[in-house]
Image (tube, rainbow, N blue to C red):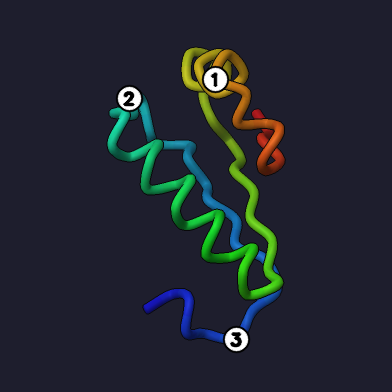
Amino acid sequence: ELLELDYTEVVFNMSFVTFIASSAIGKLIVFFKDCLSKGRRMRVKCINDQIYELFHYIKLYQLFPIER
């Protein structure tokens, strides 16, 4: 449903996320690709240090901006 709305950028605030499963990471990547296909941007912000390190390790920063 979110992809049908009119916007230019999606920002995921993950300040309350303490754990993320691989399936959720997969959903983020699929959502990012859908955003890209519609000419939109996506970024993730307010992630904790452990998730930041994981995202950096699997190089998600190459797809979309990741902010602590």
Residue located beneath label 1 in the image:
58
Residue linked to disc 2? 19
Look at 57% across and 13% down and name the residue there.
Answer: 57
Which secondary structure, mark 2? loop
Q: CA distance from mark 3 to mark 1?
A: 30 Å
- Binning the other alpha carbons within 10 Å of mark 3 as few (below 14), some (14 to 19) or many (20 upward) gives few
Is residue 62 found left or right of 14 in the rendered image? right
Mark 3–mark 2 distance (CA, rounded to whole Å): 30 Å
Q: Residue at x 54, y 20 (%)?
A: 58
Mark number, residue 6: 3
Nearer the camera: disc 3 or disc 2: 3
Residue 38 spot, x, y in % from top left:
63, 75
Amino acid residing under circle 2? Phe
Q: Secondary structure at mark 3?
A: loop
Mark 3 touches mark 1? (CB < 8 Å)? no
Sooner in the amino-acid sequence: mark 3 or mark 1? 3
Q: Secondary structure at mark 1?
A: loop
Q: Earlier in the sequence, mark 3 or mark 2?
A: 3
Where, by quadrant of the figure, is residue 61 drawn? top right
Q: Nearer the viewer, mark 3 or mark 1?
A: 1
Q: Residues within 10 Å of mark 2 (few under 14, many from 20)?
A: few
Which amino acid is tagged 1? Ile
Quarter where residue 2 is shown: bottom left
Q: Position of residue 1 (x, y in %)?
A: 37, 79
